[in-house]
Image (cartoon, coloured by chain):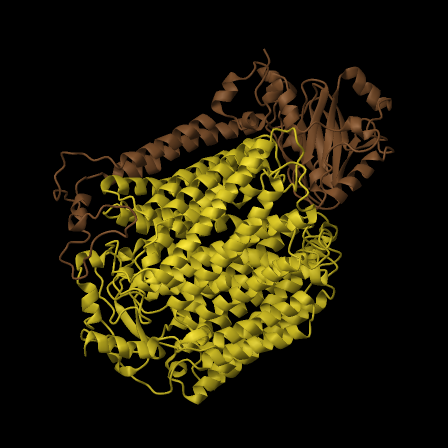
Amino acid sequence: MLAGSSLIFVFVMGLIALAWRRPPDTPPDTTPDGARDVGTGTAPHGVSDGLSDGAPNAGSGIARDAARRETPEGRFVIGLGLAFPLAVLAALLAYGLVVGERLMPRAGPDTVTVSAEGRQWDWRFGYADAPGIETRDVLHIPAATPVDVRITTVDVVHSFWVPRLAGKLDAVPGHTNVLRIEADAPGRYAGLGAEYNGPGYLGHDFTVIAHGPADWQAFLRGDITEGVAADTAKTDRRDAEVGTGTEAGGGSGAQTTAKAPSPTEANETATPEGARSSPSAAGAAPGNSAGTSPRGTTGDAAAVPAPAAPASAPGSAAATAPATGPQDSPRQGDRP
Amino acid sequence: MTALRRHRALTRVWASDPGWRGWCTTVSHTDLGRMFLTVAVFFFVTGGILAMLIRAQLASPRSAFVGPDVYNQLFTMHGVLMMFLFAIPLFEGLAIYLLPKMLGTRDLAFPRLTAYGFWCYVFGGAMMIFSLLAGIAPDSGWFMYPPLSSTLGAPGINSDFWLIGITFVEISAISAAVELTVTVLRYRAPGMTLSNMPIFAWYVLVTAVMILTGFPPLILGSVLLELERAFGMPFFQVAQGGDALLWQHLFWLFGHPEVYIIFLPAAGAISTILPVMARTRLMGYGWIVAASVSLGVLSFGLWVHHMFTTGIPHMGLAFFSAASTLVAVPTAVQIFAWIGTLWRGRPRLHLPMLWILAFFATFVIGGLTGVMVAVVPFDWQAHDTYFIVAHLHYVLVGGFVFPMLAALYYWMPHFIGRKPYFKLGTTAFWLIFTGFHGTFLLLHVAGLLGMRRRIDTFEAGQGWEVINIIASVMSFVMAIGFALVLIDVILNAVIAVRGSRNPWRAGTLDWAMPTPAAAYNFASLPHVTSREPLWDDPSLPAALARGEGYLGDPARQRRETLTVEPATGAPRYIVVFPANTAFPMGMAAITGLFFLGLLTKIYWLVPLAAAGVVACALRWAWTLGTRRPEGALPVGRGVSLPTASEVADPPGWWGSLFLLVADGTFYGSLLFGYAFLWTIAPNWPPPAYAEPGIWLAALAAAGAIFAPLGQRLNVPAGVGASVLGLLALGIAAAGVLRLAPDPTRHAYDATLWVLMGYGLLHLAVALLMTLFLAARRRAGFVSALAGGEARIVRLWVDYGTLVTVVSGLAAGLPGVLGSLSVGGAP
């Protein structure tokens, strides 16, 4: 997408620059298209040309030059103005729709459902497989498993964003939006609230921890307690941030270790696989998709909004997708 | 009569009052256009200072320059000032100043309305500036998403300043749009057909109609949110049947057309300036007109692309993604038509042309990133990051500010009547151009690196420090450039020598006058047969000054101009304009008291101020016209025409028609909001639906028959029938209100109150107008007796009747459906 845009930009700028070309062999006053003599010296008010900011005083002859070239209207307006963008945009749109279609969540037997509840200014996470556990600002998920995040809010509009795992999806009062995320490998992923929500916006972040199968079972049993709601350290941290406005990082106690890497750090430290869910890759540049690893392109950045009905369960969200089998998931399909 | 004596005679009639009094009493489009431009530049400077504070804060990580509470006001007010108090008013000012001159007429359709809009703008803008200085400015972001902007997230007065101040300012946008539309359609030089209009007039027409249809959803949203904040009517509170998404829909239903409302006038300026700079004619006039019209239409179909991350169903995403990419096509048509024009001509590299080149370079990048974010998966990542910040600045600065600077330098000889002497402009150009790209180009990257917009500071070590310090430094370079432009203009206005007429050798009529322009524009009105009358006949200005056109004889000692048939340009009737008056300023001040009462919750002031506004409006209309029939009067060149008082479609009818277009869009948005809440919002149905009985329905039906019918009966009893009909409708509407006594209970009840309140308001207006017309008939005004005013009143009565009936049906429909389904299923 960047390369294509640069090409178009250079093309347009080149066209403009070429407009200053001076074909030497075109005699003046021969053009039939009737571009008028702009200001002949015969006009009673005809004074010298220009407002003294740089042009040579060309006198009354200037306008005749205007008529020297005949440029067909059709080539510019219809060819370049109409046909060219239509072709480019149609291709781009088709590509975007195809990618978007592949990002649709499919129902699968191994899909894990978690809930994310935004508030000013923290996130609380619940787990369908372990109803008793609530974590704050730390979301535990199993790695290499599709996860549906049911996003809600208790106060204002928030947005749930884990840059390396998926795009954004808003938390809108009264609505439940379902986002499909999937982490390829165990590890920590930075998450952010990405909709402005008041004075504490800066510190409205969280960490996603993707576990291997054993750790995930340990978490579900309650053996891993990082971020579990009884731990109130984050609350202190938030207050500190709101107070100073500069304290974005780890604050007190146990949370220091839980401090998420920033998205950039995440991107910088990411393995090559990790880079493919960076924005430019998710933007589905034609070149990128061909160049990324054979394990998949944007399939792991699966994101989909649910229908805006209040009670849309993950199942119902998936039901709106074309009826395809669970094995049809793009990631799996792309795998060799 | 010599040209000089004609000039003096016309000046006596048309001149504004001398000195500072003239500022308060002027109704001249030349003066008011300049005043609009000046005040808009003031707000640009203010918004620019806020931008500098923002960049100062973000220059380094962990900056302690301002805290989040101040920073949130800074970025909110930067957006608000630039969008609402700079961009739109600057367009209005430019169009108000130029349009009559380009169209070959002497003023805009409603001179006092121009002044009223200007003062509303000034007073409303002053409210916003006050909030900024007092530290209680809006701080919820310029698009004010509830619940953050409502009582839950913003219990203070901050949001009220936005909701009330901006609504006040929008009066000026709507009034300017009404009169620009009427002016383009009716107030042109005789002979000027639609297809011979200067291209700028086409752009103004499209933009004005877009304002009429784009701003009402915003005004509705502001009214609803203020009702929620002030009176607890829960339109956006989900627990009581509201929905925060309704605001987002209403806001972006305005917000996206707004982008094109800002871009199109700039494109109009380019289409005017670029051919002159290239010494040729515009390529593809018809294509460009078609492109601007289709931009206007398409722009209403893609507001959802600002909401891709809110959980819109997949099919909706596909549709709006397609529409968002499609809108690039008419833009491309214009851009390539301009490039073709350059190819055909021999371009000169004057300062306006430099700015147009800057526009090309910047706007093309902005357009390309725009196409990127129209691709949904990309937008899910880029949304609400600095990528979007960079994109929107490329579009708005590249697509509006740069062309407006081109326009400034192109029309500066016209505005100030001087020949530019100082050459600061070129230095300023390079400072602004490099400063702009230095600021924003790398911010795209910051966005891709995950920098969210609206964070008040950031941590070191994320790869953002270098980008941000570069952006901050370059933004100050840009600011110095803008300061140089200001100094340049002021120096030239004060010091430079008088300029010559038509220094660029343009072909449009705005250059067919001495500069600075005389108060009357044209000593006589030209007869136009082509798009570039000055190229056809370079001696035209002298001929007009000699009085060889229309209305060259000032003998009647009043401000006269001509109107034409909308399509063909055939002359139709004479309009007599009002003279200087401070009345519009006073009326704007009283309107300001109305909004001030709402803002400070001094509610006894509100009905008083409203009554004051009504009294002013009645007096305003009463002074129009004459009691002495004049018949057809000679207008020169052997033509005789009647005055506006004696025709069936006076300017007021056209103004009413387009005001009702805006009003109808407002009402349509209300119905949309109602349907949206009914079908989408959680927590519906309400505890109970209103079920208007058969008696209310019968009363309303009788009223709906008699009110419009009475207007059409040409007997005294007709007035009585109409009045009774309106009263019957009003009683029926009040009866519906009694069925939902508590508007704070549920969004349904609140919506019902707004629906019926809207109907009652329009019934009251219709009733007043009916009685007013009867009084004017009795007083013997020609215009009241000739039928023109009766048609205006009929328009408003019909509209009031229609909306009241529709409101009643809409309010009662769920209840009737409910009782039917209950009755049908025993």
Q: Classify B623 as above or below A234.
A: below
Give the x, y percent position of residue A265.
65, 25
Q: Name the quarter where the C terminus of chain A is drawn.
A: top right
Residue at the location (62% across, 22% down)?
A268
> How many discs mark residues in the rendered view?
0
Q: Classify A134 as above or below B726.
A: above
Chain painted in yellow in the figure: B
Q: Residue A72's image quarter?
A: top left
Give the x, y percent position of residue B126.
57, 64
Give the x, y percent position of residue B550.
23, 72
Give the x, y percent position of residue B805.
57, 66
Residue at the location (25% across, 61% down)?
B501
Q: Nearer the viewer, residue B578 or B420?
A: B420
Q: Nearer the viewer, residue B591 or B206?
A: B591
Q: Classify B604 as above or below A164.
A: below
Q: Residue B187's image quarter?
A: bottom left
Q: Is residue B628 visible?
A: yes
Q: Residue B125's image quarter?
A: bottom right
Q: Is residue B266 left or right of residue A233?
A: left
Q: Is residue B214 visible?
A: no
The colour applied to the residues of chain A in this rendering is brown
Q: Classify B226 as above or below B591.
A: above
From this viewpoint, which residue is outermost toward the top?
A336
Q: Is residue B440 left or right of residue A308?
A: left
Residue at the location (48% across, 37% down)?
B438
Q: Nearer the viewer, residue B178 or B796?
A: B178
